[in-house]
Image (cartoon, rainbow, N blue to C red):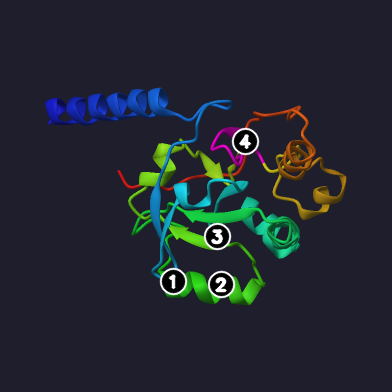
Amino acid sequence: MKNLRFSKLLAGLVLGLITAALAVTVGQPAPGFTAVDSNGKSRTLADYRGKYVVLEWHNQGCPYTKKHYASGNMQNLQKEWTAKGVVWFTVISSAPGTQGFVTPSQENDYVKQVSAAPTAVLMDPQGTLGRLYAAKTTPHMFIIDPNGTLIYNGAIDDHATSDAADIGQSKNYVSTALSEAMAGKPVTEPATRPYGCSVKYAN
């Protein structure tokens, strides 16, 4: 039994080291991926070369996610930036049997209910995409520029709380980074510490 526990611990440590080694780095090419969306369509990052791409890790039941959806903040961001040509992918990496897992039809119902407006919702129940990007929390935000380079990795804003009242006084890192990049300026804060609920990966 002790050997089994040790083997599992060792396997977890090795997986953690591999994930850290593969973790995406700001200023470097964003890892390519293919994922199926909630409507059964295959989405490949390479197909969106030439566009800004936002990845937003999501969990319906997470209080930090609810903060941005119940207030309408996330939906407003999605609508604002997709109207400017940005591709916005919401990503769900909760594994079956864990908190936050939903079926594609359940997610589509939720999107309609809250009037969300991402380009698509990517279903990642095995955590392949989440681990590829080392997504840690919901929300955890990433921005990829038209050249395929990661230009932002981190929190949605600078108030790491679940209180929607904080949104009005928060600096939105995602909007700031997109505005700066689209204006041809360097992103002043390309990496911040993400906050929220932990992503519920499969063991």
x, y percentage for residue 153?
A: 60, 34
Q: Nearer the viewer, residue 148 or 107?
A: 148
Q: Earlier in the sequence, mark 4 or mark 3?
A: 3
Tell us which disc is closer to us: 1 or 4: 1
Spatial separation of the CA atoms under disc 4 and disc 3:
20 Å
Q: Label 3 belongs to which residue? A: 61
* Contact? badges 1 and 4 (CB < 8 Å): no
Q: Label 2 belongs to which residue? A: 110
Q: Quadrant of the C terminus?
A: top left
* Contact? badges 3 and 2 (CB < 8 Å): no
Density class for disc 1 (Cα within 10 Å; few <14, some 14-19, many ≥20) is some
Q: Label 1 belongs to which residue? A: 39
**Numbered range of the magenta stretch:** 144-155
Q: Is residue 133 left or right of residue 127?
A: right
Q: Label 4 belongs to which residue? A: 154
x, y percentage for residue 97?
A: 34, 59
x, y percentage for residue 51?
A: 61, 48
Which amino acid lies under the numbered mark 2 shown in the image of this protein? Answer: Tyr
Which amino acid lies under the numbered mark 1 shown in the image of this protein? Answer: Asn
Q: Nearer the viewer, residue 5 or 10?
A: 10
In the picture, the disc for residue 195 is none
Spatial separation of the CA atoms under disc 4 and disc 2:
25 Å
Badge 1 element = loop
Q: Is residue 127 left or right of residue 89?
A: left
